[in-house]
Image: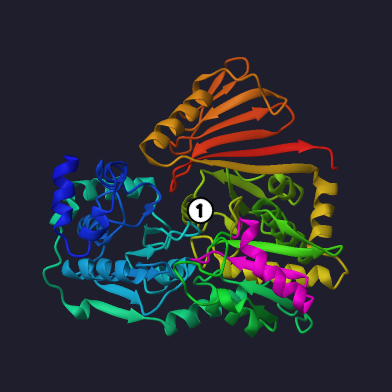
Amino acid sequence: MNIKEEYERWLLLDGMREELLSYDDKQIEECFYKELEFGTGGIRAIMGAGPNRLNIYTIRKNTEGYARYIEDYGDKKAGVVIAYDNRNNSFIFAQEAAKLLASHDIKVYLFESLRTTPELSFAVRYVHATGGIVITASHNPPEYNGYKIYDKHGCQCVPRDTDVIIDYIRKVGNCLDVRIDCYDIRMIKYIGNEIDEAYYRELLKVQENPKLDKSDVKIVYTPLHGTGNIPVRTMLSRLGYEVYSVKSQCVPDGNFTNTESPNPENPKSFNKAIELAKEKNIDFIIATDPDCDRLGVVVKHKDEYHYLTGNQTGAIMLQYLLSEKYKKGTIPENGIVFNTIVTSDLGTRICKKYGVEVESTLTGFKFIGDKIREYKGKKTFLFGYEESYGYLISEMCRDKDGVQSCILISEIYNFYKKQGKTLIDVLNDIYDEYGYVEDIQDSEYLPGLDGKKKIEEIVNQFRYEDLKEVEGRKVIAKEDYMLSVRTEIDGHTTPLTLPKSNVIKLFMEDESWVVVRPSGNEPKIKYYKNLWGEKP
């Protein structure tokens, strides 16, 4: 791509000139050295001018490629469902995608206002659409937005589909050449309340003990300015819980003005919620991220508020579900739980006690959703989760669901509260029974072209260097998911069957492990550690 020529062409576009003229040479290079790439997780990028930024032109190009894919592989009459979150430009991007699809005579179901990502997954299945699009950047900072594509099963597209879609997108050519000349407005149907109520009816089934008295349970909840505000508050209220919301964070706001972070993985995101909990003397706080597919939990224990990690919340959920089903005799013989290769093995030990199979997928909940589809009618789905605060209890959706998660964790809190226990007590009981593990996730933010090169260097260091020891523990094996091979300490190799992915996992002799991988959506290198030891 000729950066200078492309820059000059973008200067002629309405609304782009002022922004482009403010760029320095480094910024121009970042925005124009390549076109924004649709990856296996779709797109998550900074909004702005240029082919390497998210804007109406790059949205049009990617939707044009998707439209051509549907014409060859999908069902135009079945249509595509489109949802969007509270981020800046989300509605504009959703409209552009809808008009582009309509110009190809593809039916569109466009939500009339912002909705959660899991409801998009549900809606695709509910209306029997051929696919779905959601405009969101999940929990990223305000300058980001994103674009994800879902298949007819309500699952975010996996590589066997995205590889084909990416090829269609590449063949579109320059994003500025994509035009929406005309379309039939009747091809776009606005949807809302009917889908909401169908979704809510199914959410009632998430409860494990629906008759549990909820009249004395108080909850502090924050949607962090995002889409969870209405569905989470609606469901918890309908179920009988008393919900106190952080009002300043209930307003849809793409700038996330009243929160220090829109990410419930970040303890700072709970600051205002903890203030409210202290004011109201409430022991239990939950938060969902902007597109409401992730859940964060804070609980009071011995006069202190404690943050639960994604792995800890997942273990508590899993222990509760399986122990309660065991007492009722409702664990199916063919039951299965899904997690990912970076999820703590604590949950695996819990499943082993109850004789439940566990299967690990690559990172990305789409792989769990795809496994649910694959095993439909063969194995009974019981639970799916990942360390990054994503959980799925009912397969009514094929993506992680923050609303489902809020319902279940609130029930669990209520269940143990009636026994005089906090969730920290429950977690300590789990450690006492299954072993103490410390799960740590670190990441390094490395933006731009230089950052991309640095990330490659770090991964290759783990890939090609013969590491004997990590975290003071002897390495006994290495799994390389890009090369699809497991190598033992003695040099013996066995093939790996998961799809190729740029991930390295090192196993230590005490059953601990460490994983390194580039983020699929952000300019980050991520490290995951699962370290077993004595309880402190």
The residue closer to the viewer here, 439 or 194, is 439
- The residue located at (65%, 38%) in the rendering is 529
Residue 253's x, y, as percent? 46, 72
The question of residue 285 being in magenta is answered with yes
Task: Kindly tell me whether residue 329 is visible in this rendering.
Answer: no
Q: Is residue 87 left or right of residue 427?
A: left
- The residue located at (59%, 79%) in the rendering is 247
Q: Is residue 528 left or right of residue 461?
A: right
Residues in magenta, as a range: 264-292
Q: Secondary structure at mark 1?
A: helix
Q: Quadrant of residue 283?
A: bottom right
Residue 232's x, y, as percent? 58, 75
Residue 356's x, y, as percent? 68, 51
Q: Quadrant of residue 84?
A: bottom left
Mark 1 neighbour class, 10 Å CA radius: few under 14, some 14 to 19, many 20 or more: many
The residue closer to the viewer here, 219 or 313, is 219
Residue position for label 1: 365
Task: Kindly tell me whether residue 92 is visible in this rendering.
Answer: yes
Residue 228's x, y, as percent? 53, 72
The question of residue 80 being in magenta is answered with no
The residue closer to the viewer here, 18 or 4, is 18
Which of the image's four quarters has the C terminus? Answer: top right
